[in-house]
Image (tube, rainbow, N blue to C red):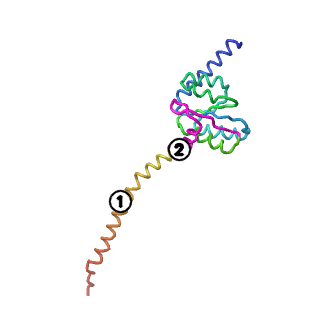
């Protein structure tokens, strides 16, 4: 039986993880078996840059934290060597980065995830990874708003240019002074 202080430490870790899960829009659970130290270091750096926290902890502790926040269905995926990546703000970021590494490393595997308080399967996580970033979506929206306006402006300018050419041809040439 663990001592009281160790038990309190574990409870604090579970409470911290539960708080992170509750306050985050999305996260992904992976099986990290077979990843090299070099690849793991690069992956962790990419996750940090994307604002994602990546943690390896005991499956039982992760399971308890998931239960506390209503993600009890996640426990079925917590077998073997698992880690959890939690996004602080961008729901797409963990899926994007981890999908890239799943494609590179044969044994690295996305297991499941959660999105807005609901557990989602691997296929949903993979679909989430295909969504462009927020900045790209905003740029596309602005481009689609701007495009018809530019088309209208070019059409008006073409009419003005055509009318201007016709007016020049119709106007008599100025007479030369003698």
> At 67% across and 34% down in the image, what residue appears?
31
The residue labelled by disc 2 is: 131
Q: Position of residue 37 (x, y in %)?
A: 73, 38
Where residue 88 sits, quadrant-wise, is top right
Q: Say the numbered circle drawn on residue 61.
A: none
N-term-proximal mark, 2 vs 1: 2
Q: Does 14 appear above or below 77?
A: above
Q: Is residue 4 magenta?
A: no
Is residue 172 left or right of 47 when viewed as pictured? left
Toward the viewer: 53 or 119?
A: 119
- Please tell me whether mark 1 sits on a helix, a strand or a loop: helix
- Figure quadrant of the C terminus: bottom left
Bounds of the magenta span?
107-134
> At 26% across and 77% down in the image, what residue appears?
171
- Figure quadrant of the N terminus: top right
Toward the viewer: 82 or 7?
A: 82
Q: Position of residue 36 (x, y in %)?
A: 74, 39
- Please tell me whether mark 2 sits on a helix, a strand or a loop: loop
The residue labelled by disc 1 is: 152
Residue that extends furthest to the bottom in the rendered view of this protein: 178
Q: Position of residue 86 (x, y in %)?
A: 58, 32
């Amino acid at each position: 039986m663990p001592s009281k202080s160790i038990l309190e430490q574990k409870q604090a870790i579970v409470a911290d993880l539960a708080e992170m899960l509750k306050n985050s829009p999305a996260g992904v659970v992976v099986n990290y078996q077979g990843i090299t130290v070099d690849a793991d270091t690069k992956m962790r750096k990419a996750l940090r840059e994307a604002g994602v926290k990546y943690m390896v902890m005991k499956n039982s502790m992760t399971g308890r934290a998931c239960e506390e926040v209503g993600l009890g269905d996640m426990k079925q995926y917590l077998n073997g060597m698992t880690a959890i990546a939690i996004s602080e703000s961008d729901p797409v970021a963990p899926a994007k980065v981890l999908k890239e590494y799943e494609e590179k490393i044969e044994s690295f595997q996305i297991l499941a995830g959660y999105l807005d308080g609901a557990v989602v399967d691997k296929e949903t996580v993979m679909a989430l990874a295909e969504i462009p970033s927020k900045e790209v979506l905003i740029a596309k929206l602005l481009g689609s708003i701007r495009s018809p306006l530019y088309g209208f402006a070019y059409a008006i300018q073409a009419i003005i240019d055509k009318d201007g050419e016709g007016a020049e041809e119709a106007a008599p040439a100025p007479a030369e002074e003698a």
